[in-house]
Amino acid sequence: MTPELNEDDIAALTALRWDLHRHPEISGQEERTAARIAGLLREIGVDRVETGIGGHGVMGVIEGKAEGPMVMLRAELDALPIPETGKSAHVSVRPGWGHLCGHDGHMVTLLGVGRALSRVRPERGRLALVFQPAEETGAGARAMLEDPRLAELRPAAIFAQHNLPGLPLGQVALREGPIACASCGLTIRLTGRTAHASQPETGVSPRGALAEILVALEGLSAAHPLDHPEFAMATITHCRMGERAFGIAPGEAEVCATLRCLEDRAMARMRERAEALVREIAARHGLEVEMDYADVFDAVVNDPHAVVPLRAALDRSGITHSGRGQPWRPSEDFGQFARLGPLAMIFTGAGSDHPALHDQDYDYPDALIGPVARVFLAAAAEVWAG
């Protein structure tokens, strides 16, 4: 008997997504969401539920009838600190927070897989459903992998999805190799000495260094296509100098930039170059400098061994797929899970004219829930069949 989802399942999963959408929680604060997911996993009868993994992370394990390989599926718990302006009946009730990246849809898709397999257990093997906190900050996967309950697992394949506005609804992007960029947030703090605005020459202003650094950072961008190994992009995201006052010549400044590369090796080189440029400029202007990083994401690289069962599952499901849409510029911390085993992520088309990810009007298409759950069920079956 083949595990499958029926109309009642889809209706229940859709209602659940609407509930999760109404109650978004941002990175590190997914307490209600995690408790809801854990309760639902117990309700559908998974064999083991683990909570508090790397913060609010949750894992449910379904055992097959006999020993065999483990398949891991991963979804994200967190929402965004962006106010939702959509007009749906399930619009966010949390001011300033919204599920505007589709993680609510990703979660219920995994729960759909769990519902189907809890009724018809695999003949062999195990399934781990992993619900990860803090994806948006790049911290959640690392934190989960520091927990031995997850770190000791060795899945034969790890699968995930991300929905992709701009790709026709229901189509899938899948390819081997790098599919999501490495990125990091670089903060630069310059310190000189303040002075009276009438005597700026008595201080040490960061003005000249700041102007040079802005140009130097943007000069790190490389004019290569996105799928080129040396693709690099630097984006200035914040700039501030001194106080909002008219009597003080500034003595300090701060710059924030996002550095982005297709591959981790290129990112390491870009970081070294950025740091060297900033230190040279600061020294030349007589300034002290501090630098630190946040929101650090490794590249996501689809392993050929994990792509094979996904392709077979898509073909069996009659779903159109190609490499279109991969790689993409945004980052995803799913790549961290490669420490455990071969992984692959599919991009699922949210519609050619669908609002973009992180847009205030974005909403995950409910029509994707059933088809993507069926793809994951079929891909897991491919792995278990060996």
Image (cartoon, rainbow, N blue to C red):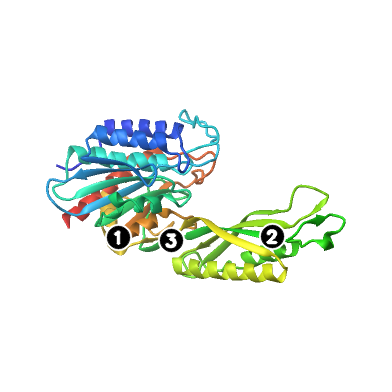
Asked if residue 215 lies left or right of residue 95, the reply is right
Q: Of the residues under marks 1 and 3, which one precedes in the sequence?
A: 3
Label 1, residues with CA under 10 Å away: few <14, some 14-19, many ≥20: many
Q: What residue type is labelled 3?
A: Ala
Residue at 57% over, 70% down: 273
Q: In which quarter of the image is the C terminus?
A: bottom left
Q: Judge depth for marks 2 and 3 and give the one in front.
A: 2
Which of discs 1 and 2 lies nearer the camera? The answer is 2
Marker disc for residue 299: 3
The quadrant in which residue 158 appears is bottom left
Q: Please, what is the three-letter code of the amino acid marked with disc 1?
A: Pro
Decide: is 333 above or below 262. Answer: above
Kind of residue at badge 2: Thr
Q: Tag on residue 342?
A: 1
Q: Is mark 1 on a helix, strand or loop?
A: loop
Q: Residue 238 got which mark?
A: none
The residue positioned farthest toward the left in the image shown: 66
Q: Are marks 1 and 2 in contact (CB under 8 Å)?
A: no
Q: How crowded is mark 3: few (under 14 residues within 10 Å), some or many (20 or more)?
A: many
Does the image show residue 379? no
Q: In which quarter of the image is residue 369?
A: top left
Question: Residue 109: x percent and y percent?
Answer: 33, 41
Residue denoted by label 2: 191
Give how far across and how far down residue 290 sits, in percent. Answer: 61, 61
In the rendered structure, which disc, 1 or 2, sits on the residue that comes first in sequence?
Answer: 2
Where residue 60 sits: x, y (%)? Answer: 27, 42
Disc 2 packing (10 Å; few <14; some 14–19; many ≥20)? many
From mark 1 to mark 3, how far is it between C-alphas?
Answer: 14 Å
